[in-house]
Amino acid sequence: MSRTRLLAWLGLAGVVAATTGCMAQRLSVAKDLAAHPEAFSTAPEQPERRLLLVGDSTGVGTGATHPRDSVAGRIARFHPNWLIDNQAENGAKFADVAEQLRAANKRYDLVLVLAGGNDVIRLTPAVRLRENIASTVRLAQAHANVVVLMPSGNVGHAPFFPPPVSWLMSRRSKQLHAAVEQIAQESGARYVRLLEPPETDPFALQPKLMHAADGLHPSSRGYAQWYDELVRQGGLAPEPTH
């Protein structure tokens, strides 16, 4: 490691140490939010469409006031006759999402992947992350013709992270989205972009409204914003006919 990079990491470590008390309190709140998650699923007798949702805590809906306020819950609200099989788990990285898909044994009309935030926070190396994203897409395409990748927005905009940690999280969030977008283009998967600059990102402009009490996960309003983007960018559009 170069001297410059070493000094940068030492400086980052110093700031983290100085803010340990605040972050520890927020981490405790985050753990409480995730302690008893209820991933929203539905199983109508004659579903019009079958959706498999895989991913991390944002797929579970951690931080929402009620499971129906999660992305899955909002899909069910507007599409009550859809089957939603939600296999998302708190703490999952893209490598874990691949395992969720390996455990699935059914065909679906759509696979929705909500993941990436934990890879950003837990510093998954770039090469390994790209491999895990590509593997996730390949496995998802074995279950459905339509695969939608919706990685978390700019993690650096979460109040949980003070500067300069937030700067690192923002840089890694951009790297995540660049990798997901490229792999989506190469594979034919759909990509929903939640990454925005601070001057237009609702999560940066209204952090208390858009984030849950832990300052990390989306709130019910935050998930509503994500759902709106999922619809606006065509993530739930039917498979094109040829």
Image: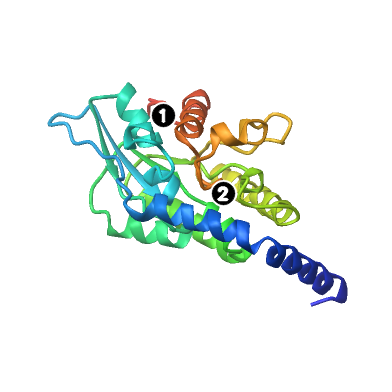
- Label 2 crowd bin: few (<14), some (14–19), many (20+), radius 10 Å: many
The residue that mark 1 highlights is 236
For the image shown, how many numbered marks are present on the structure? 2
Horizontally, is 196 left or right of 35 in the view? right
Horizontally, is 6 left or right of 92 in the view? right
Residue 242 in sight here: no
Quick one: quadrant of the N terminus? bottom right
Residue displayed at 38% across by 32% down: 69
Q: Vertically, is 10 above or below 46?
A: below
Classify mark 1: helix, strand or loop. Answer: loop
Residue 104 in sight here: yes
Residue displayed at 87% across by 71% down: 4
Q: Position of residue 89 (x, y in %)?
A: 37, 54
User: Residue reaching furthest left?
Assistant: 45
Q: Are marks 1 and 2 in contact (CB under 8 Å)?
A: no
Q: Position of residue 116 (x, y in %)?
A: 53, 52
The residue that mark 2 highlights is 183
Q: Position of residue 162 (x, y in %)?
A: 69, 52
